[in-house]
Image (tube, rainbow, N blue to C red):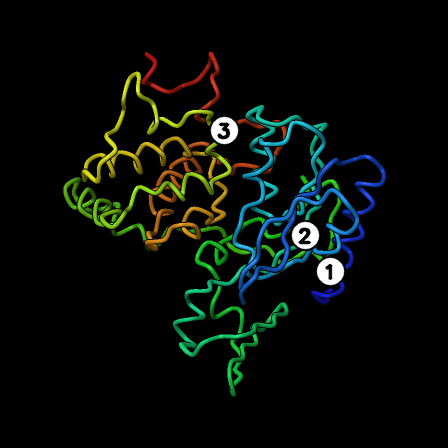
Amino acid sequence: MTSLPDLNQKIQSAAKRLLAEGKAEVVIGCRQGTTPMTVAPIFCRTEDDCNQLIWSNFAKINLATYLPKYPGKVAIIAKGCDARSAVGQVVEKQIERENLYIVGVACGGLVDVEQIQAREPRPIRAAEEDWATIKLSGDGWSSSLPKEDVLRRNCKTCVSRTPEGVADELIGEPTEALPADDYADLKALAGQSLEEKMAYFKGLVKNCLRCYACRNACPLCYCPVCFVDETRPQWLGKSQDEMDTFTFHLLRAFHCSGRCTSCGGCEAACPMDIKLREFNRLLDEEVQKDWNYLPGLSWDQTPPLTTYRPDDEADFIK
């Protein structure tokens, strides 16, 4: 595969070309963070900006989150889930297709920094990466970890590591597709009673701070005013009331039903390490089973729960 340094050069060259040709007024990508194992978003408008663009196994941000904020021509350096989210925003008419240019990059899966820190508790001063290994070092020591051992949970079942079919151009060699999520770990939960399910999901969010980092990191949460901030009517209280907290997560999950690309941005942003995707995965399974639909893989197909057909066979409308 293309080495990461070579991949970075190709990304930088593509970004400079898009700006020079007027195909984009800004190129959204990632740059190195200020501490080891971190990256930050960058909005490139000049050649010097483009020189900072990198591709990293630590890029947990879904860059499509920023797209609706730019009314002009925008290019995005996108891994598979970023590209699918961008497609979803076009389908839902949040951005115009003619204003969007997707530079797709084949992704080998991203790593979970918390898993790395659990395996290597010593202070990490530097981290080097390639497609297969994460090399760590500190004061007087060095070690390495196989990347596959510390992959993020959502990356282990990603069905679109390579954004083929939706990217305007593709950098890097396509990576092998993985088996889709079989939801095996949720089968036991599905067979439990309503009370047991309620207890499980309330337990998931019992430590929630209501900081809304999950909402702010999600490319699907583009509403000008979120329902949690509405005052006429007021849907939820602002306290740490258990039912208000649970209702927020439940309603957000249904809002994302059939639209979530399983990018894991919500979990990556959560300061309390809540497994927020458990809500979405149950709903994703239902959508896939009933409609055979995966979001963000087609420019023409809209999410089933936002689609109406007069010949719909669903009994609920009779």
Q: Is mark 2 on a helix, strand or loop?
A: strand
Q: In this view, does 215 lie above or below 135?
A: above
Q: Splitting the image into 4 quarters, where does residue 132 fall? A: bottom right
Between 117 and 50, the residue placed more toward the observer is 50
The residue beneath circle 3 is: 303
Q: Give the image location of residue 230, x and y in percent.
A: 34, 23
Query: Which of the image's four quarters has the C terminus?
Result: top left
Query: Which of the image's four quarters has the N terminus?
Result: bottom right
Q: Is mark 3 on a helix, strand or loop?
A: loop
Q: Nearer the viewer, mark 2 or mark 3?
A: 2
The residue beneath circle 2 is: 105
Q: Splitting the image into 4 quarters, where does residue 233 fall? A: top left
Residue furthest toward the bottom?
A: 140
Answer whether labels 2 and 1 touch (C-beta < 8 Å). Answer: yes
Q: How far apart are marks 2 and 1 (CA)?
A: 9 Å
The residue beneath circle 1 is: 7
Q: How many labels does the image show?
A: 3
Quick one: label 3 or label 1, which is nearer the N terminus? 1
Which numbered marker is on residue 69?
none
Residue furthest toward the right?
A: 21
Amino acid at dot 2: Val
Q: In this view, does 53 lie above or below 63?
A: below
Q: Which residue is drawn at 65% across and 27% down?
A: 71
- Callout 1 environment at 10 Å: few (<14), some (14 to 19), or many (20+)? some
Amino acid at dot 3: Pro
Q: Residue at x 49, y 30 (%)?
A: 222
